[in-house]
Image: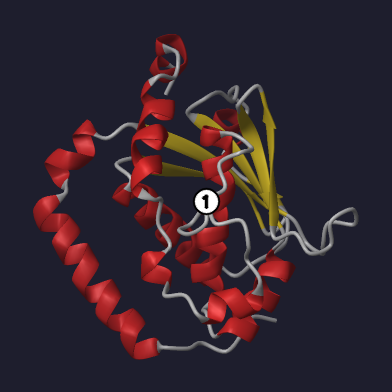
Amino acid sequence: MEPRRRRAHYRRMRRAFFPLVNLLLCPLAALAQPRVTITLFDLAGLSSQTIREMKAETTRIFRAAGVGIEWLDCELAGKPVNLAVCAEPLGPTRLMLHLIPGVNKTKPKASGMAFVEGGAGVFACLYPDRVWEHASGANWEFGDLLGHAAAHEIGHLLLGSNAHSPAGVMRARWETEDLRRLSHEGLTFLKGQLRSVQTAVRQAPVAERSQR
């Protein structure tokens, strides 16, 4: 079950306005952006609309940081897709995201986890049930908050485990009471993190980038 849709008027305005701006202003900029591919495994059986909203929010946040996101669906509602392409190896610009039902038994309050070694990683997971609880209690739309949680964990894969900040999308606390006070338009990468995100992607080995 997903939370009741809220702020429908705002969403309609944003969906009408931002695609038009992107169409007019972004084609040349997009060509110059470093890009990351996210291989997505939906093990939680989310609706297609929620998946679209999650992808849109994550993509928007990274676009604002100067990094393009390409999504590759590898499993949707428990059904594998794109098997051959999804079998290609992971790397600095090809990451894996799992949406997992239930909660983390070791850290039941965690909305997600990124597995980082040596300052970077290739695999992260989200717990949509936990994100749903936050969204429902904080008057956020589920897909939007899930997209922010995805951006947070992907941010850790690129920036490392010590990338938390006091504000922005890499903020350490994602408690319901904190989210009630926040405007999601402000949850982006902080100014000091923008260059780090771009550098992490641009410095990926040339051989790895050429496989994409």
Where is residue 63 shown, x and y percent of the image?
A: 32, 48
Foreground of the two, 148 or 86:
148
Quarter that holds the C terminus: top left
* Figure disc tally: 1
Q: Residue at x 40, y 41 (%)?
A: 193
Residue 140 placement (x, y as % from top left): 52, 80
Q: Residue farthest to the right?
A: 105
Place residue 8 in its image quadrant.
bottom left
At x 56% / y 54%, what residue is drawn? 150
Residue 85 screen position, x and y as percent: 54, 30
Residue under pointer 1: 165
Q: Position of residue 171 (x, y in %)?
A: 55, 57
The reply to whether residue 73 is visible in this rendering is no
Three-letter amino acid code at the position of disc 1: Ser
Q: Residue extending furthest left?
A: 24
Q: Residue furthest front?
A: 166
Please name the residue shown 78% across and 64% down the image.
Answer: 109
